């Protein structure tokens, strides 16, 4: 799944007294300082301070060794976990579609658990997990079985369940808890239903694969180009590691991959449609990544979880996928229809 990277500046506090010499000369020799026990001839040489140490110039200090760029994560673990997830997803996608829907539902439930737990830990917001988890899984299944209508009805019922479930607790904090719950229901399971709806087409497996490939390629292009050539920050207050050069890499990689996927994987697709699709994916994936970065900055955390070594949590892998799903679904419907 997608990997996105983030050293301290050289130097530090300097010793301001390192170049200072003790005063000496005829005026100061006439009144020597009082004798202390360790100033006697028997004192060890190491305990006697030199009278006139030579000032040390900054030029004599060795230059700090250059630092290498770091990806910011355990790259080996990240690649291993990414490959394992890819195998599970592709295998379920092309063997039994219902199994893939189950994989999406499990990812949604885990993502909701991570999000609600972080909200509780960092902000004291207690979004009710039980109705969110049940409603979220039902939302994905309804999207696959009944399309957009099923997804909207499930979303409405899940929001209602959140409102009612929270009534069993004291009224203090009710508004912020249910607001966070409705937001979580929309942000995670509702957006994920568009992946399930993509799957219902005759070439649904290839549509989902195109969606996944373009998102991964966009994130990989942003990472590779930004890590190697990135100099100009894209949104330093939100995500200091992202650069404008990385964004150009994401757009370039995604447009090339989109042209190839639309030409060879999607029924009745053409390469120019793939260029537009890749551009849209790069934009939505970047905005999705920045959106979750805003949430994590507000919460004061680096990752949403620790479930996936080298990646963080499930939500840290879904950040660019979730907002990209409705974009890809809509453009594919416009380009080649919903069948």
Image (tube, grey):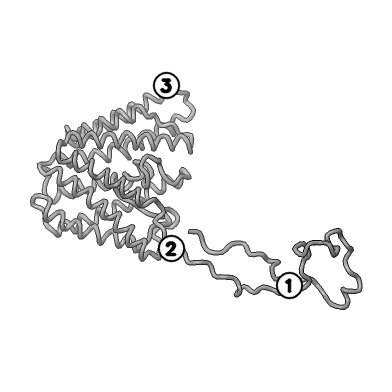
Q: In this view, does 180 lie to the left or right of 271?
A: right
Residue holding disc 1: 53
In-front residue for pair 172/306 = 306
Residue holding disc 3: 168
Of the numbered discs 3 and 1, the one sitting upstream in the chain is 1
CA distance separating discs 3 and 2: 55 Å
In-front residue for pair 230/331 = 230
> Does dot 3 land on a helix, a strand or a loop?
loop
Figure check: 47 above or below 194: below
Numbered tag placed on residue 68 in the rendering:
2
Q: In this view, does 190 lie to the left or right of 96?
A: right
Q: Is residue 171 left or right of residue 276?
A: right
Q: Nearer the viewer, mark 1 or mark 2?
A: 1
- Of all residues, the one furthest to the bottom in this rendering is 26
Q: Position of residue 197 (x, y in %)?
A: 18, 39
- Of all residues, the one furthest to the front in this rendering is 42
Q: Quadrant of residue 144?
A: top left
Q: Which residue is drawn at 33% across and 40% down?
A: 187
Q: Nearer the viewer, mark 3 or mark 1?
A: 1
Q: Evaluate if marks 3 and 1 touch, with contact meaning CB atoms under 8 Å apart.
A: no
Q: Position of residue 60 (x, y in %)?
A: 61, 74
Q: Where is residue 289 in the image (x, y as percent from the top left)?
A: 35, 50
Q: Which of marks 3 and 2 is in front?
A: 2
């Amino acid at each position: 799944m997608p990997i996105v990277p983030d050293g301290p500046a050289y130097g530090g506090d300097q010793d301001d007294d390192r170049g200072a010499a003790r005063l000496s000369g005829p005026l100061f020799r006439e009144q020597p300082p009082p004798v202390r026990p360790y100033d006697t001839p028997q004192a060890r040489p190491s305990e006697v301070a030199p009278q006139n140490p030579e000032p040390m110039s900054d030029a004599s200090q060795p230059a700090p060794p250059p630092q290498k760029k770091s990806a910011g994560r355990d790259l080996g673990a990240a690649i291993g976990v990414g490959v394992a997830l890819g195998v599970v997803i592709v295998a379920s996608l092309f063997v039994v579609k219902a199994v893939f829907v189950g994989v999406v539902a499990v990812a949604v439930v885990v993502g909701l658990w991570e999000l609600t737990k972080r909200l509780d830990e960092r902000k004291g917001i207690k979004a009710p997990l039980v109705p969110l988890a049940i409603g979220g899984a039902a939302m994905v299944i309804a999207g696959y079985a009944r399309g957009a209508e099923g997804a909207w009805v499930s979303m409405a019922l899940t929001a209602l369940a959140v409102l009612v479930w929270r009534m069993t607790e004291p009224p203090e904090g009710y508004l912020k808890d249910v607001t966070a719950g409705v937001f979580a229901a929309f942000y995670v399971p509702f957006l994920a239903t568009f992946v399930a709806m993509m799957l219902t087409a005759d070439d649904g497996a290839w549509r989902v694969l195109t969606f996944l490939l373009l998102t991964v390629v966009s994130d990989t292009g942003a990472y590779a180009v930004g890590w190697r050539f990135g100099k100009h920050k894209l949104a330093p207050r939100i995500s200091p590691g992202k650069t404008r050069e990385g964004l150009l890499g994401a757009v370039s990689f995604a447009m090339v991959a989109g042209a190839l996927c639309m030409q060879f994987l999607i029924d009745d697709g053409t390469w120019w449609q793939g260029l537009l699709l890749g551009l849209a994916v790069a934009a939505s994936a970047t905005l999705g990544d920045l959106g979750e970065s805003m949430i994590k900055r507000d919460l004061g955390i680096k990752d949403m979880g620790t479930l996936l070594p080298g990646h963080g949590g499930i939500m840290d892998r879904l950040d660019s996928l979730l907002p990209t799903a409705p974009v890809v679904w809509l453009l594919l419907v416009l380009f080649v229809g919903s069948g």
